[in-house]
Image (spheres, helix red, strand yellow):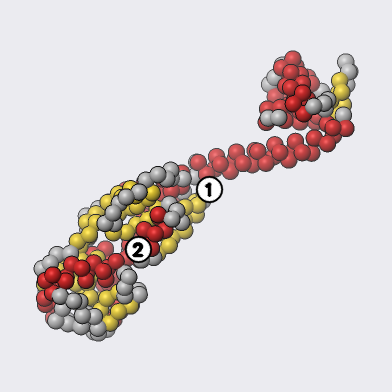
Amino acid sequence: MNIKQLRAFLAVAQALSFAQAGERLHLSQPALSLTIKALEEDLGGPLLTRTTRSVALTPEGETLLPLARQLLADWDNAEELLRQHFTLQTGKVSIAAMPSFAGNLLPAALKTFRDRHPRVNVAVHDVINEQVLEMVRHRRVELGIGFEPESTQSLVFTPFYLDRFVAVVAADSPLAQRAHITWKELLKEDFVTLQRPSAVRLMLEQDLAAAHGKLSVAFESHQLSTVGRMVASGLGVSAVPSLCIAQMEELGARCVALDEPRIERRIGLMRLADHKLSAAAQALQDVLIQSCRQPAA
């Protein structure tokens, strides 16, 4: 039994006329008769009784009629739903992004995506960089945004740009007037940073170890916004990726170029190499690459 046969049966059963059913389906009467005969042979018995003047349903035909209606309705609904997904009239996509990106560059990209595809739902998971990788690798999200992983095995990494760390100081600090400062100068102040296992914290510790030893932390928090407010309140200084400059300055802190050493990391989009993206995820990926591939601020 196939969809073509069911449509033929339903058309005849509703019209009780092969001629009218053939016109509706754009089939000749011989072709329609052969289709019904094939369906009856597949099912094992007659569904219609035919005379030269009339067509009627057999008891088995009466049994099949409501089932055929439901099966065809379900089939049409499934076709329409998939068509809407492929044409982005509806759909859903999940993305994981580290908070520094999710709270700064991602909203503008999502606005562009929403303007293009207003009926596609986007679920954003703002999680630390390590969790971004985990969610992508375990297929909990289709796309992830974070620092370039040390190993890209099983992943496709599309870089957006090379981001650098900048110093964050209070607006009334003498350091706020400088064009750039060194890590040696910055670390003379109480240091405020994110708690482990934040990728930002781990990168700072690893890259500073050779030249400046163990990072001495006075205050730590799970949220960048809290770090920014603590610095703005005069509790100390910090260092964050440059994509957070606008966020830090909105919180009342100031950002200054930071050298010796210059700490940089590529930020980009991650997906599984063996995973075929959904139409919604592919469209979102295109918008993200178009919107976020730019020089670091």
The picture places residue 39, in percent across and down from the top left corner, at 75, 25
Q: Residue 268, how many percent across, how many down?
A: 30, 54
Q: Could you tell me if residue 258 is visible in this image?
A: yes
Residue 256, disc: none
Name which quarter of the figure residue 296 lies in: bottom left
Going 15% across and 78% down the picture, which residue do you hit?
Answer: 187
The tally of labels here is 2
Name the residue that disc number 2 marks: 130
Q: Nearer the viewer, residue 79 or 210?
A: 210
**Of the residues under marks 2 and 1, which one precedes in the sequence?**
1
Give how far across and how far down residue 1 sits, in percent: 71, 30
Up the image or down, 141 lies above or below 8; here it is: below
| Helix, strand or loop under label 1 | loop
Residue 121's place in the image compared with 84, above or below, is below
Q: Residue at x 18, y 67 (%)?
A: 207
Locate residue 254, reporting x and y percent. 21, 74
**Circle 1: is it few (<14), some (14-19), or many (20+) Cα within 10 Å?**
some
In 3D space, how far apart are the residues under numbered discs 2 and 1 (Cα atoms)? 31 Å
Q: Residue at x 78, y 25 (%)?
A: 40
Amino acid under label 2?
Glu
Image quadrant of residue 32? Answer: top right
Determine if residue 255 is in view.
no
- Can you identify the residue that label 1 sits on? 90
Disc 2 to disc 1: CB gap under 8 Å: no
Rendered residue at 27%/51% (across/down): 159
